[in-house]
Image (tube, helix red, strand yellow):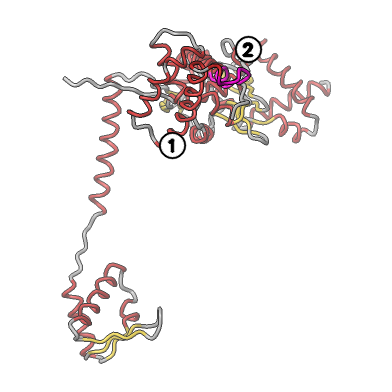
C-alpha cells in the first residue's frame, strides 16, 4: 500500500474511534502531517464513501469532521435504539441556527444585527446543546456536525439555495 | 367564549416585517415610514420585557429618523444612508426568514444521520421546533406543567416539617441554667444548638433582660456574652 493511501486509511480509523467531531488541526497533529494534506485526504475519503454507497458518510462543518450513518437508514437504526426523544427548540433558536448555517462562520454581533435582537443568551443555549461551535478570535460560530446530521446533510453547502443566502452581504456600518 | 390572541414577535424586525406584510407593501423607505406609528404604539401598549426593549427602541429611533427624512427632505442631507440601511437590514432579515423554511423542512424529513453510540447512549434526540400552537400542543404543555408542579409540591410537602420552638420554654431553660450557676456564658450555651433554636434562645435572653430578671454584658464586639441573674 502506498504511503498516500495509508494516510487516508489512518484518518478513517481516527474518525471511527472518536466519539466527538475531530478538527483537521488535531488529526494533522496526531498524524504529524500538514493540515493541507489532511484536508485533501478527507476530501478523498468523503468521495470514496459516497462512491461505494457506504452506510457511513463523512460529515463536515468548517474544520470539524465526523463519521455518521446514512440518513436513509434511520428507520432501521431506530429499531436498534432504545428510544427517540424530542428536544424542544424555540423559534429564536431556529432563527439563530438558520443564520449560522447559511452565513457561518459568523460573529455574535452579526447574528444580533440580522435578527435585530441581542443573541448572547440563545447562542449560549445552542452551544450547550452542541448544535453550534465557537471558534477563533473574535469568536465566530458555525453549526456543528451534530446539527448537520439532524438535517441529514453532509455539509452546509448541501442546504437549499445555500449560495444565494450565503452571499447576502451584511452591511453593519451603522452603529 | 374566550378569545385568546397570541401576539408573539421574535423581535423588532419580525414585528416590522409583519406590519408591512399586513399592509401588503414592499419593503421601502416609504413603507417603513408608513408603519412607524403602528410600530411605536406597539411598543407603548405591549409590555415588552426590559431586556428586549432596547432592541425595539433602536429600530424605533431609525424609523423616526426615516420618517422625518421623508417629511422634511430639505433638512436632511441626502448622503445619509440611515434609511437605506434599515431597508437593507429588513431585507436581509426576511431572506433568512425564508431560509428558515428550508431548515425546517429538512428537519421534518425524519431521516437523521447518527454517529457511533457511546456506552449506553442508545437514545436519539430529535430537534423539535414547535412553531404552531395547536390545542393538543397546549394540552401537552399544561399536562407537563402540572406534572412538574405536582412533583415539586410533593417534594415540598415532604420537606416542610415546621418546627415550633417556644419562647416560653427557652426562657425556662435559661432560668433553670441560672439556678445552677449564677453566671451563664451565652456563647457556650449556643454551641451544638441548631440555628433556629439559638435565635429563640437569644430572644429569650432579650426578653429576660427587658423584664429585668437578668443582666447582660458583652465586653466588646463578638466577645462572649455573659448573662447573670439579678
User: Is disc 1 in contact with disc 2, using a CB cutoff of under 8 Å?
Assistant: no
Picture quarter containing residue B48?
Answer: top left
Which residue is label 1 attached to?
A: B51
Assess whether residue B93 is covered by the magenta stretch.
Answer: no
Q: Nearer the viewer, mark 1 or mark 2?
A: 1
User: In this rendering, is residue A44 above or below A22?
Assistant: above
Residue A68 drawn at (x, y percent): 58, 22
Whole-angstrom CA distance, mark 1 to mark 2, is 34 Å
Front-most of A7 and A107? A107
Residue B114 drawn at (x, y percent): 54, 23
Front-most of A58 and B148? B148
Residue B94 drawn at (x, y percent): 50, 15
Looking at the image, which residue sits at the far right?
Answer: A2
Picture quarter containing residue B77?
Answer: top right
Q: Residue at x 48, y 19 (%)?
A: B67
Question: From this viewpoint, is residue A109 visible?
Answer: yes
Residue B71 drawn at (x, y percent): 48, 16
Quarter of the rendering occupied by the C terminus of chain A: top right
Q: How crowded is mark 1: few (under 14 residues within 10 Å), some or many (20 or more)?
A: few
The disc placed on residue B209 is: none
Q: Do labels 1 and 2 share a chain?
A: no
Circle 2 chain: A
In the displayed structure image, the side of residue B9 where residue B113 appears, left or right: right
In the displayed structure image, the side of residue A150 where residue A36 appears, left or right: right
- The part of the chain drawn in magenta is B75-86
Which residue is label 2 attached to?
A: A163
Amino acid at each position: 500500500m502506498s504511503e498516500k493511501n495509508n494516510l487516508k486509511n489512518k484518518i478513517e480509523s481516527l474518525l471511527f474511534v472518536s466519539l466527538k467531531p475531530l478538527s483537521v488541526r488535531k488529526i494533522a497533529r496526531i498524524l504529524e502531517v500538514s493540515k493541507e494534506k489532511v484536508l485533501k485526504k478527507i476530501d478523498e475519503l468523503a468521495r470514496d464513501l459516497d462512491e461505494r454507497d457506504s452506510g457511513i458518510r463523512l460529515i463536515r462543518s468548517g474544520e470539524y469532521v465526523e463519521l455518521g450513518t446514512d440518513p436513509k437508514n434511520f428507520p432501521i437504526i431506530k429499531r436498534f435504539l432504545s428510544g427517540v426523544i424530542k428536544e424542544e427548540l424555540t423559534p429564536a433558536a431556529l432563527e439563530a441556527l438558520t443564520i449560522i448555517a447559511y452565513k457561518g462562520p459568523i460573529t455574535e454581533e452579526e447574528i444580533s444585527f440580522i435578527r435585530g435582537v441581542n443573541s448572547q443568551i440563545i447562542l449560549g443555549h445552542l452551544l450547550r446543546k452542541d448544535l453550534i461551535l465557537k471558534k477563533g478570535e473574535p469568536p465566530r460560530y458555525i453549526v456543528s456536525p451534530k446539527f448537520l446530521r439532524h438535517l441529514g446533510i453532509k455539509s452546509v453547502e448541501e442546504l437549499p439555495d445555500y449560495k444565494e443566502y450565503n452571499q447576502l452581504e451584511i452591511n453593519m456600518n451603522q452603529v | 367564549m374566550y378569545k385568546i390572541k397570541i401576539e408573539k414577535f421574535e423581535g423588532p424586525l419580525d414585528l416590522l416585517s409583519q406590519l408591512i406584510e399586513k399592509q401588503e407593501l414592499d419593503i421601502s423607505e416609504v413603507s417603513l415610514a408608513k408603519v412607524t406609528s403602528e410600530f411605536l404604539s406597539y411598543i407603548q401598549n405591549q409590555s415588552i420585557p426590559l431586556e428586549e426593549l432596547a432592541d425595539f427602541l433602536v429600530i424605533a429611533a431609525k424609523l423616526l429618523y426615516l420618517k422625518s427624512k421623508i417629511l422634511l427632505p430639505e433638512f436632511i442631507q441626502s448622503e445619509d444612508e440611515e434609511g437605506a440601511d434599515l431597508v437593507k437590514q429588513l431585507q436581509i432579515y426576511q431572506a433568512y426568514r425564508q431560509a428558515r423554511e428550508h431548515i425546517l423542512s429538512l428537519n421534518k424529513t425524519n431521516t437523521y444521520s447518527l454517529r457511533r453510540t457511546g456506552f449506553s447512549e442508545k437514545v436519539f434526540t430529535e430537534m423539535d421546533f414547535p412553531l404552531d400552537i395547536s390545542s393538543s400542543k397546549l394540552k401537552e404543555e399544561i399536562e407537563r406543567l402540572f406534572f412538574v408542579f405536582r412533583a415539586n409540591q410533593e417534594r415540598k410537602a415532604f420537606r416542610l416539617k415546621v418546627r415550633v420552638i417556644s419562647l416560653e420554654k427557652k426562657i425556662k431553660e435559661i432560668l433553670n441554667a441560672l439556678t445552677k450557676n449564677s453566671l451563664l456564658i451565652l456563647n457556650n450555651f449556643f454551641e451544638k444548638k441548631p440555628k433556629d433554636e439559638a435565635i429563640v434562645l437569644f430572644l429569650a435572653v432579650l426578653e429576660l433582660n427587658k423584664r429585668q430578671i437578668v443582666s447582660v454584658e458583652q465586653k466588646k464586639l463578638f466577645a462572649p456574652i455573659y448573662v447573670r441573674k439579678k
